[in-house]
Image: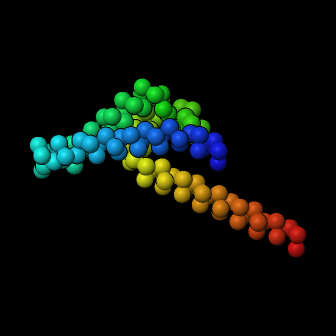
């Protein structure tokens, strides 16, 4: 789990920074682009995420063990960052659930062999 935390720590920081940037820009877009504000906010978040992903060499799939993703890793990493901190929280919940399931299975297997 420590490896995953180390992998996701930069993503958490960058996601939080992107969220804050969007919070700062939101009033301007509300004033100028009210009907299409959501579209512009999403495009801006993706653009900033792509720039930061490339500049920081952040590769989520590579960090998780996928060696051959290449450009797809950049896109997936950027999309993950645009989800904000909720995306990281969701991923951590999935990992924790998976860990609990594996521990439960290991416990059941241990009980079966000792019977």
Figure disc tally: 0
Kindly tell me whether residue 14 is visible in this rendering.
yes
Using the image as rendered, state which of residue 16 and residue 109 is in the foreground: 16
Based on the displayed image, in which of its 4 quarters is residue 17 positioned?
A: top left
Q: Position of residue 76 (x, y in %)?
A: 43, 40
Kindly tell me whether residue 79 is visible in this rendering.
no
Q: Position of residue 68 (x, y in %)?
A: 53, 31
Residue occupying the far right of the picture: 114
Q: Position of residue 86 (x, y in %)?
A: 43, 53
Residue shown at the point (65%, 63%) measured from the top left: 101
Using the image as rendered, state which of residue 13 and residue 64 is in the foreground: 13
Residue shown at the point (22%, 46%) measured from the top left: 26
Residue occupying the far bottom of the picture: 115
Q: Is residue 110 left or right of residue 69?
A: right
Using the image as rendered, state which of residue 72 and residue 79 is in the foreground: 79
Residue shown at the point (13%, 49%) measured from the top left: 34
Q: Position of residue 51 (x, y in %)?
A: 36, 29
Residue shown at the point (71%, 64%) measured from the top left: 105
**How is the structure coloured here?**
rainbow
Instruction: Say above or below: 105 vs 38.
Output: below
Question: Can you say which quadrant of the picture contains the C terminus?
Answer: bottom right
């Amino acid at each position: 789990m420590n490896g995953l935390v180390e992998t996701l720590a930069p993503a958490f920081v960058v996601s939080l920074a992107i969220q804050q940037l969007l919070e700062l820009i939101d009033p301007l877009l509300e004033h100028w682009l009210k009907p299409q504000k959501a579209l512009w906010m999403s495009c801006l978040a993706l653009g900033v995420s792509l720039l930061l992903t490339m500049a920081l060499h952040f590769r989520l799939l590579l960090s998780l063990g996928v060696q051959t993703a290449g450009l797809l890793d950049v896109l997936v990493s950027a999309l993950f960052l645009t989800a904000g901190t909720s995306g990281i929280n969701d991923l951590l919940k999935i990992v924790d659930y998976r860990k609990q399931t594996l521990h439960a299975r290991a416990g059941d297997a241990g009980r079966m062999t000792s019977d």
